Image: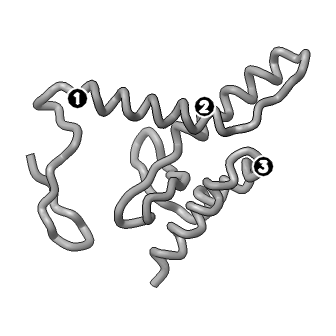
C-alpha cells in the first residue's frame, strides 16, 4: 500500500495497514521509548492517592500525545492535537505543553521549533 506525501508528492510506504498484522518490534520500541521518557520526568511524593493517580494519568497522557515527524521536527518530540480522530500540529493545542514545562521542558522546546519550522 502506498500513500503520497502531501508536501512533496513522493510515494511513501504505510507503516501500519489493515492488510498485515503490526510488527511486534515496533510496539516494543514504542513502549521502551515511552518508559525511558517517563523515567526522566520528576515524580511527586504525597500521601494523597488521588493526586498521585491524577499526576500519573497526566504524565501518561503527555507521553501518548508526543509525536515527531520529518515534515515538522528535526527528531524532537512535540505535542500533537486531534487524537483520536486525526493528528496534527496546531499552534494553540500544541502550546498546551507549557502547562507541563516544569516536568517536560523538552516538549516545549520541540513544539516551538516544530511550529516555527512550518511558518511561511
Which residue is found at the position 86% from the left and 24% from the top? 45
The kind of secondary structure element at disc 1 is loop
- Per the rendering, the mark at residue 60 is 2
19 vs 79, left or right, is: left
> Badges 1 and 2: C-beta atoms under 8 Å apart?
no
Q: Nearer the viewer, mark 1 or mark 2?
A: 1
Q: Which residue is mark 1?
A: 23
Circle 3 residue? 102
Say what secondary structure mark 3 lies in.
loop
Does label 2 or label 3 sit earlier along the sequence? Answer: 2
Q: Residue furthest right?
A: 47
**Image quadrant of residue 46?**
top right
Classify mark 2: helix, strand or loop: helix
Left or right relative to 16: residue 85 = right
Quadrant of residue 15 in the image?
top left
Do residues under tags 1 and 3 come within 8 Å of each other at their CB atoms? no
Rendered-image quadrant of the N terminus: top left
The residue under the point 78% across, 22% down is: 52
Separation of disc 2 and disc 3 at Cα?
Answer: 16 Å
How crowded pointer 3 is (Cα within 10 Å; few <14, some 14-19, many 20+) is rated as few
Q: Residue at left 50%, top 58%?
A: 76
Q: Earlier in the sequence, mark 1 or mark 2?
A: 1
In percent of width and height, residue 50 lies at 81, 18
Q: Please give the name of the residue rendered at 28% of the width and 29% of the height, measured from the top-left corner.
A: 25
Judging depth in this view, the residue of 13 and 74 nearest the camera is 74
Viewer-proximal residue, 47 or 38? Answer: 38
Of badges 2 and 3, nearer the viewer stands: 3
- Rendering coords of residue 64 (x, y %): 52, 37
Q: Quadrant of the C terminus?
A: bottom left
Amino acid at each position: 500500500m502506498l500513500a503520497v506525501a502531501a508536501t512533496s508528492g513522493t510515494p511513501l510506504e504505510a507503516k501500519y495497514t489493515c492488510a498485515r498484522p503490526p510488527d511486534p518490534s515496533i510496539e516494543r520500541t514504542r513502549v521502551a521509548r515511552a518508559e525511558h521518557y517517563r523515567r526522566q520526568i520528576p515524580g511527586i511524593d504525597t500521601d494523597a492517592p488521588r493526586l498521585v493517580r491524577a499526576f500519573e494519568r497526566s504524565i501518561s497522557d503527555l507521553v501518548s500525545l508526543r509525536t515527531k515527524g520529518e515534515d515538522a521536527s528535526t527528531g524532537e518530540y512535540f505535542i500533537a492535537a486531534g487524537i483520536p480522530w486525526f493528528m496534527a500540529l496546531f499552534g494553540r493545542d500544541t502550546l498546551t505543553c507549557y502547562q507541563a514545562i516544569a516536568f517536560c521542558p523538552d516538549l516545549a522546546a520541540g513544539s516551538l521549533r516544530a511550529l516555527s519550522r512550518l511558518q511561511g
